[in-house]
Amino acid sequence: MRVSIPGVLAALFSALGLLAAEGSQFERDIRPILEKHCAGCHSGKSPQASLDVRSRASLIAGGISGAAVVPGSAEQSLLYRRLLAGQMPPVAPLPREYVILLRDWIEAGARAENPDAPAKTDGHQHWAFRTPVRPPLPEVSAKQRVRTPVDALVLAELEERGLSLSADASPETLIRRVTYDLTGLPPSPQQVDRFLADRTADAYERYVDELLASPRYGERWARHWLDAAGYTDSEGVLAADVIRPNAWRYRDYVIRAFNTDKPYDRFLLEQLAGDELSDYRKHDKLPPDVVEALEATGFLRTAVDATREDFLPKDFAEYQWRTLFDTGQIFSSALMGLTLQCARCHDHKYEPLTQKDYYRLQAFFAGAIRPEGTVLPTYKRVIVEATMAEQKVAEKVNGPLDLLVKALNDLKRARLAQYRAKHPNGDSATERELREAFPDYAAKVDAIGRELREEEARRIHLPTIRALYDLDANPPPTSVLLRGDPKNPGEEVSPGVPAVLDDPSRPWQMPEPAAGGSTTGRRKALADWLTRPDHPLTARVMVNRIWAGHFGSGIVPSVDNFGRSGTPPVNQPLLDWLATEFVRQGWSIKAMHRLIVTSSVYRQSSVARPDGLRIDPENRLLWRVPPRRLEAEIVRDAILEAAGRLDKTMYGEPVMTRTRESGEIVPVDDECGGRRSIYQLVRRSLPQSILAAFDAPVMEINCPRRTTSTSATQALALMNSTFITAQAGHFANRILRERPPAGEASGRKTVEHAFRIALGRGPSPVEMDAMLGFLERQKHHYADEATNIVQWRIYSDLCQALFGANEFLYID
């Protein structure tokens, strides 16, 4: 029966409206009411009357009685008529102010931030989109194997399937495993001896604490994070692949953050909004903590960025927009484990993520990354770390210098054109041909070159920070791009979090920007939301990444995809317990490492067992520790460490590369020694050859998870690379110096020392005999050389053989 509304009552409703009609929105104002009072019956897989009240789209679609909401007409909206008549909810009528609010919302067109978002059906019930709840620790039969709560949670799954943990690994195996895992370097023979001699009950735990306190720890675990962040030292896209002169400051920030155990929530806050947190503009001289916060925002400057002054947005939109698109993908995959980039052109086909969600997220970055309007080239988007007085001095010197340098370069080009005109090859004449044909050309050009170098030496270089910061507090509007095409904008959207992750009990709202402010405050608001203790994804994604770093695979194997299209968790109680514990421990990353590596699960042997292979052949439940090959950077670092040639200097500009005639791309100090691989130049177009052979990622966008391959190029590199042969020679020098062959046991102590350095153990009797026989056979290959050279040669060959051993390349 149709209910008419008396005019007096309608006027009363208009007078009592609590919210201006044009201001109310479904997500903020209506959904919380319906979820509290109506969703108990009208939601889920089988809602009453087939009506789901949890989205605007489902209200308009209606149920068996027809549309529940008709935008623009409350009188035609069945939901409003039932609420007004007091027929619903059946237990107690809805408070009058809510009915008024609902009426005004419908009459104003039933506005919603995401009008086409689906109802919270099975997608919203997906485990990853719900706040983790700390599970109780289960009772297990093998109580003697429970060293940490991790053990109880893993054992419960194993025992349910008739399995158990494997026995502990040998002390030699364990110390090698944990040292590589926490520092990325092998244990020294002295560390091994000290550990094996320590018989106290907590010897292993104290050794773990020693590793976590080492500066090498930050270098090791920064590499994992830099992969996820997409860190490189070059801009990408164009053939020039220009070097980023100050990107390394973000790399150093990450290393320091891990070494100081910066709480993860603060770590994220600084990386997303360090400029807004620090209010850096109020300082003339930037304090150290402000500098650190600005360096942190390098996280949002890792994406490909080829913007130049001669680029016009209309002609180079592909380059401009890619930076924004890739930044959003790095953010969502690294921090939330979501494939949000799939919603750029249309609503996600597999996840409850809409195209509008995608562009609302982009709006957070609109204050800083503006693909339309005047192009600000990438090298100018920096913050100068100098006072205004220092900048004025530099400007006074550099301004006239720029004019002089330009004049000299113009003169150099003029000379080139002048002499090419005289040469038979004309404009195609090379520099070498010109120098050979015209000695006076060479003299003139060299003189200009000397003058250029002298003038450039006078230039004042001020340090700069490759930071992300809002250009002002009034960013351009963000539009949904139809089919993802920047040339085809649709409706405008405001900043917002994905609807599936919004909490209806306290819906996310963008704070109003401060009056007269120089920043939007958007990224700070995003970071605050992301670091809520009850956020469904943030803690889970990080503890899963830490777990994967220790076991080779995450509890959720698809570490960058926690959605329905990803791989379900192998052990969800374990994941949720770790996530809640991570927050409870103050977001301490080191506490998570300690918890994991002191567990019985981590200390297990890697030896395969028949029952495990039969019941769980993929070892998903971790009835043993999976053997893992060292990552590319660790292979190189371990070789340098064994050779005694690793330079452990920390921080600073990356080590540049060169290309050999063979085509190998190597560091400039390749044959002598070198710094750790994390300090090597990472160039998108020219990855270092030895690292590429062992699966170091070529950074297109970012690398949330690495692949591990076994290929012929790896074996060939270990046999033929000039780096490997040079370091084998240095290794031979080391063992001959530290344990020279002498006496009746000639060679035995030297061989044993080589084994202990390379493999963390001494050779077995069979291995010793094989090595001594190898040394004797190799002497015949160098019969024509001096005796002292022969000795070095044969031990170099032995050392290179150890570098190529599976046991050197893998940790058990």
Image: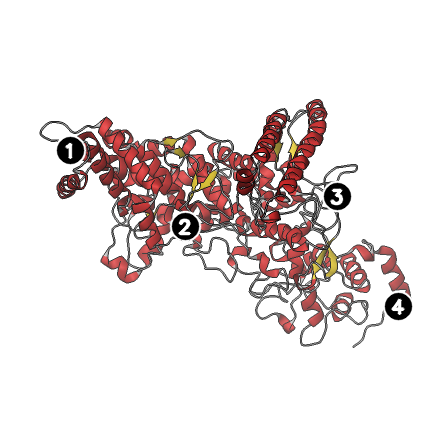
Element type at mark 1 = loop
Pointer 3 or 1: first along the chain: 3
Instruction: From the image, state whether disc 4 or disc 2 is nearer to you.
Output: 2
Q: Residue 77 location, x and y as percent?
A: 77, 70
Q: CA distance from mark 3 to mark 2?
A: 47 Å
Q: Residues within 10 Å of mark 2 (few under 14, many from 20)?
A: some
Q: CA distance from mark 4 to mark 1?
A: 107 Å
**Image marks 4 and 1: residues in contact by CB distance under 8 Å:** no
Relative to the observer, which residue lies in front, 130 or 523? 523
**Image marks 4 and 2: residues in contact by CB distance under 8 Å:** no
Q: Residues within 10 Å of mark 1 (few under 14, many from 20)?
A: many
Pointer 4 or 1: first along the chain: 4
Instruction: From the image, state whether disc 3 or disc 1 is nearer to you.
Output: 1
Element type at mark 2 = loop
Query: What residue is shown at x 49% (from left), y 31% (from top)?
Result: 651
Which labelled disc corresponds to residue 512? 3
Q: CA distance from mark 4 to mark 3?
A: 39 Å
Q: CA distance from mark 2 to mark 1?
A: 36 Å
Q: Residue furthest left?
A: 744
Image quarter where the N terminus lies is bottom right
Which labelled disc corresponds to residue 695? 2
Left or right: 398 as drawn, with respect to 288 = right
Q: Residue 391 location, x and y as percent?
A: 69, 26
Which labelled disc corresponds to residue 747? 1
Quarter of the image where one finds residue 774 = top left
Which labelled disc corresponds to residue 6? 4
Pointer 3 or 2: first along the chain: 3
Which residue type carries mark 3? Glu
Left or right: 54 as drawn, with respect to 299 = right
Element type at mark 4 = loop
Q: Residues within 10 Å of mark 4 (few under 14, many from 20)?
A: few
Q: Residues within 10 Å of mark 3 (few under 14, many from 20)?
A: few
